[in-house]
Amino acid sequence: MFFGEYPYRVDEKGRLPLPPKFRREMREAVILIKGTEKCVVAYPSAEWRRLADSLATRAVTPANLRKLNRAIFGSAFSVSFDKQGRITLPFPLRSYAEIGDAAIVVGANNYVELWNEELWETEKTSAEEQASQIIEGFEAQ
């Protein structure tokens, strides 16, 4: 399980360290894809396989499944950790998520998100407001 948020510097080669406890869970390989909210999503290999298997069994038309596969797998990258515990963020993903020389690494249960600092602050505020509303709804029941 991944949780917490951690600020890190991105070096000139696009390398980003991940927290040691995240590296232990992810082991050798990480799959990176575009997140829906302008972030990069990092999956451990085992979780990525579960996601791929889940997508293959969805009840969607073959045409929609092909489009979904293209959208998800076509922009995915497999990266490994270097000896300093860094992964290299491919330029297309860095550009998509607007990650420059700094990033926020966020644990999100069974995966990790990599964010531009400003976009993360906006998203975090929005998520906290929405979570408060959900919790208030539970308490009212």
Image (cartoon, rainbow, N blue to C red):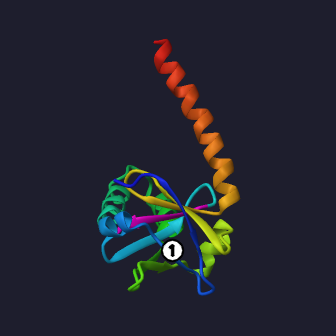
Asked whether the viewer can see residue 68, the reply is: yes
Residue for badge 1: 74
In this figure, what is the number of numbered marks? 1
Which quadrant of the view contains residue 115? bottom right
Which quadrant of the view contains residue 53? bottom left
Which quadrant of the view contains residue 131? top right
Figure check: 126 above or below 27: above
Which residue occupies 60% across, 67% down?
A: 103
Find residue 127 and report its horizontal and vertical position in percent.
59, 41
Find residue 140 and report its horizontal and vertical position in percent.
50, 13
Which residue occupies 35% across, 60% down?
A: 56
Looking at the rendered structure, the kind of residue marked 1 is: Gly
Figure check: 39 above or below 86: above
Figure check: 138 above or below 62: above
Question: Magenta span: helix, strand or loop, mainly?
Answer: strand
Figure check: 80 above or below 47: below
Instruction: Estimate how packed mark 1 is, as few (under 14), some (14 to 19) or many (20 or more) residues with alpha carbons within 10 Å.
Output: few
Which residue occupies 42% across, 82% down?
A: 84
Find residue 30 and report its horizontal and vertical position in percent.
39, 73
Which residue occupies 41% across, 58% down?
A: 111
Asked whether the viewer can see residue 45, the reply is: no
Find residue 17 and report its horizontal and vertical position in percent.
48, 74
Q: Residue 127 versus residue 102: which sits nearer the camera?
A: 102
Q: Is residue 133 magenta?
A: no
Please state the extent of the stretch shown in magenta in the rendering.
Answer: 39-44
Q: Residue 44 versus residue 65: which sits nearer the camera?
A: 44
- Give the secondary structure at mark 1: loop
